[in-house]
Image (cartoon, helix red, strand yellow):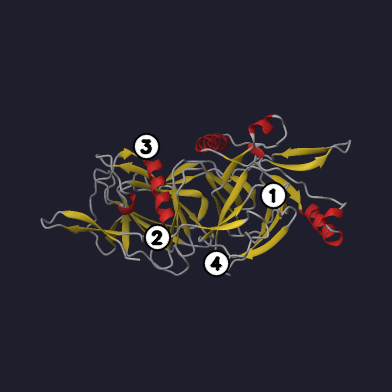
Amino acid sequence: MTDRPDLAAIAGLRWSRNWRLPNGGQSFVVPVATRRSFNVVFHGREKFSYGHYGVHLGQEDRLTFLGAPDRIITARFMDLRAGSPTGGRRLTVQFAPGSEYELRIPPGVAHDFDGLEQIDTVNNYAVYLPDPARWAAGEQEWDMDADIVNVPHSVADAETAESETKGPAETEGPRAPRFHPNARPASDVFYRLLAERQREGMAHLAHSHAYTVDTRDASGSPRKLKISERAQRGVEPRDEPIPPIAGLHWQQLAYVESGPASGIRPFFETRPYYMVDHGTAPYAHDAFGIHLGQDDHLTFLGSDDASVEVQFVDCRRGSATLHAQVALRFSPCAHRTLVIPRGVAHRFTGLENVVTLNQGVAYLDRNGDYEPATDVIDWPVGRSDYPVLAVNDEPAGEEYYDALVAGQQRMRATGAAPSTPMVLMVPDATGKPVSVAIRQQG
């Protein structure tokens, strides 16, 4: 199932095509030109069901579903926005996961999913704020820390069934609530504050992500009940060195558990990132890749029965572990990140059916320069005379990441889709090794 189902029945519900760059064969690089927070929701093998509709008042979900292309996800929507031209309308669709599209769900549109087992969702959410005057006056309810209202399926089902038999104007039974969602786009300053709040919250995690339900008190008056269950951490944050190469390590990161082998991992580091969709066909890199100006921070998304292998060689000039080697085999895990220091050569096999998410840390050279598009030296697998390379040593500042995002946004606006270059070390006329970038014409 490759076609996206039509969502026009509900105003504002839509698909947005991701910006994908050819990476050879079935593989694509998906740059995400933003420094805003996002999260990854991962789901294990066990049957997963929310059992209710979820409604955000200040958040637009922007979901990319990643998983085996033969999986089918069922999505249910109901428009609960007061005054919406499609208010009360429901929609059920089915689709397959894939990196090509992002599903955008406006605030106030209730949603629920089935078939998320072994599916990872990347949510590049957008935040909307309430009107200050109405919020201060209590006319517009919104809690930044509990921006999700749970609506039981039974209430929505009862309203729809009665409206179909009597007509919407005659409906007298249970009626799903109507909401006035926020409409003012949050500024970049707000997103930075939100990232700090998330960082602090994860460091002192005591409760899971709160939600609200509509209920009535003993007198029958309507009330909103905020529910925040005690959090269950899957792992405590820690680093796990990978000897014998100095600096090579796993980062185990905290997440909020949402079900058996399922959870939400927030990414609140304000660095841009990209995903690499490796496709489904088996393939192996015929060269080691070496960065001189970036430490890779790789999160591997995919089924836990996938088996990824990687080989490392330390090629850093001055390293205490120069030319040390190690190989690893592992399965994807959304709450663990592999940190590969710049100057450490790496070669992966078994990445089919896996998506890698890289939120790298950049370093500039002594001239204050760095070109990320050509920062991969390809060293042939058959050559054991590994190079000795000087790596960049000046951490990039805020202005670098801002300029990187701005450049990506300009390129995306042009519709350009340049392929990933190959950078080779070759001797010049004097025999000195130099790097040469080769890019395939589209």
Identify the residue position indicated by label 3 in the image.
Answer: 397
Q: Which mark is residue 29?
A: none
Of the numbered discs 2 and 1, the one sitting upstream in the chain is: 1
Q: Position of residue 218 (x, y in %)?
A: 88, 36
Q: Disc 3 versus disc 2: distance between alpha carbons?
A: 27 Å
Of the numbered discs 4 and 1, the one sitting upstream in the chain is: 1
Q: Disc 3 versus disc 1: distance between alpha carbons?
A: 38 Å
Identify the residue position indicated by label 2 in the image.
Answer: 417
Of the numbered discs 2 and 4, the one sitting upstream in the chain is: 4
Residue type marked 1: Gly
Identify the residue position indicated by label 4 in the image.
Answer: 69
Q: Secondary structure at mark 3?
A: loop
Identify the residue position indicated by label 1 in the image.
Answer: 54
Query: Going by the image, does 428 lie left or right of 160?
Result: left
Q: Disc 4 versus disc 3: distance between alpha carbons?
A: 39 Å
Residue type marked 3: Gly
| Dot 2 and dot 4 residues touching (CB under 8 Å) | no
- Quadrant assignment for the C terminus: bottom left
The image quarter containing residue 320 is: top left
CA neighbours of label 2 inside 10 A, class few (<14), some (14 to 19), many (20+): some
Query: Going by the image, does 185 lie left or right of 161?
Result: left
Q: Secondary structure at mark 2?
A: loop
Q: Disc 2 versus disc 1: distance between alpha carbons?
A: 36 Å
Question: Between 356 and 167, which is closer to the camera in this rendering?
Answer: 167
Of the numbered discs 3 and 2, the one sitting upstream in the chain is: 3
Q: Secondary structure at mark 1?
A: strand
Query: Going by the image, does 420 lie left or right of 42?
Result: left
CA neighbours of label 1 inside 10 A, class few (<14), some (14 to 19), many (20+): many
Residue 313 in view in this figure: no
Please identify, in this view, whether the residue under mark 3 or under mark 2 is nearer the observer: 2
Q: Position of residue 58 (x, y in %)?
A: 63, 42
Residue type marked 2: Ala
